Structures are given as structure tokens and as C-alpha cells.
Amino acid sequence: MEKNSLPNYNPANLGSPVGIMQEVLAQFARDLECCMPATVVSYDRNSHTAVVSPAVRMVLTTGETMDRANLSASVWRYKSGGYLIDMPISAGDTGWIIAADRDTSTFKETSATSKPNTRETHKYSAGFFIPDSFGDFAIAAEDDGRMVFQNLAGTEKISIGSSDTKITSAALTISSAAVTITGDLTVDGDASIGGIDYLTHKHGGVTPGGGSTGVPQ
């Protein structure tokens, strides 16, 4: 056998049963799919399925590298008890592709306990994608020790502490049939109620003078 046709191996493991076993286990580990960073190629939000490109290239026995094939995977979302957290995902976003122990195609179709459709094990193609960001944003110092839900710029956020909650937004819209506030309300700025400006509105039929109006009725 020519030297350049030998598989990737550690020469120190040749010549002993223990060394050969280590090579067998090492080769098994190289082919085992488990977890890998990936980049989003496209995303279908209706089916919460993303096409992702594994971000770590394959190393061939010749020492050369090649890209891994793109994968289609379900995107992990928080959903339980009738509630859901769902975020937009765009091409170029990053995360982790997680392999499944067994073929999950039948379960994904039926959402019911089922046997695997194939004998494949530990494959990314049967797994799922977890969105993640690798060091391209930072939480503000004022939010240290708090739970934060925000955009990457930090200009829109909900910050929850042990005794208070802060909402930061350029424009906040609340759509509700009724809003009840228990406690005092402080408004630092103007307010519009029923289309009437609070700070600048005027009352007709009032004679100017030095007195003050009575309490609201």
C-alpha cells in the first residue's frame, strides 16, 4: 500500500493491539455527528425550518479541506403550555446544529411516538438548529444581574430585575380592550387622551380670573 493512500492515523499507535484500538475509536469519533456551529442559508418561518451550512470544514486524509453539505433542520423554539417565543431568522445568522440519536423524520411528521424510519444514528440531518450569536453584542452594565430581552443594538429591550421591570423603546404600542394600572402613574412628558393633548388643551366657557378651578368631576 502506498504511503499517500493510508488513512489519517497516529504512527505511534501502529504495532500494538491497544494502539490499533485507539485508532479504531478515533476513526469512529471522526465520523460521529454531534454538535457543530452553522450559518443560516435560508429560513421558512411558517414551517420553522432552516437550511444551514456547517461552519467547520471537513479535513481529508490528504490534509486538504472541503465544505460540508448544507442541511435542512427544524429550528428550536420555546413552545409549551400554549405559549410560544418565536424570533425572526435571516440568512447569515449563526447557531448550532445538533444531531439526533435516531432518525426523527416520522416523529416530525406525526408528533407522535414512533419507530425510526431508518437505521441512521447521530446524524445532523435528523437533528435541529439552535440560533446563537457568537460575541457580537454585549449587555449594558445597568442590566447586570437582570434577565434581558433585547435587540442587538440594545435600543429596544425589556429588562427584568428582582423588584422592577424596565421597558426601553422608541415607540411602544399596546393593543388591549382595557388597561388597568394598580398604583401611581408617573408620566415624564406629554400625553394624548382621546385625541386631546394633556399639556396644551383648553376649556371653553371659562371666564379668566385669579381663581382656580375645582376638583375634577
Image: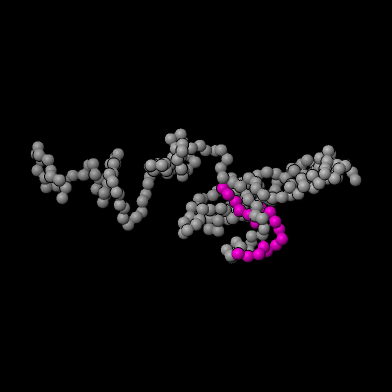
Q: Quadrant of the N terminus?
A: top right
- Counting every numbered tag in the picture gives 0
The answer to whether one can see residue 125 in this image is no
Q: Magenta stretch? A: 113-131
Residue sitting nearer the eye, 197 or 145: 145
- Image coordinates for residue 102, horizontal then vertical, percent: 67, 58
- Image coordinates for residue 186, horizontal then vertical, percent: 29, 41
Residue, far front: 18
The quadrant holding residue 72 is bottom right
Image point (64%, 60%), residue name:
104
The quadrant holding residue 109 is bottom right
Relative vertical location of residue 178 with respect to residue 57 in this rendering, above or below: below
Image point (10%, 39%), residue name:
211
Residue sitting nearer the eye, 137 or 107: 107
- Image coordinates for residue 140, horizontal then vertical, percent: 46, 36
- Report the side of 169 relative to 15 (left or right): left
Image point (85%, 45%), residue name:
17
- Report the side of 66 relative to 21 (left or right): left
Residue 65 among those drawn in magenta: no
The answer to whether one can see residue 56 in this image is yes
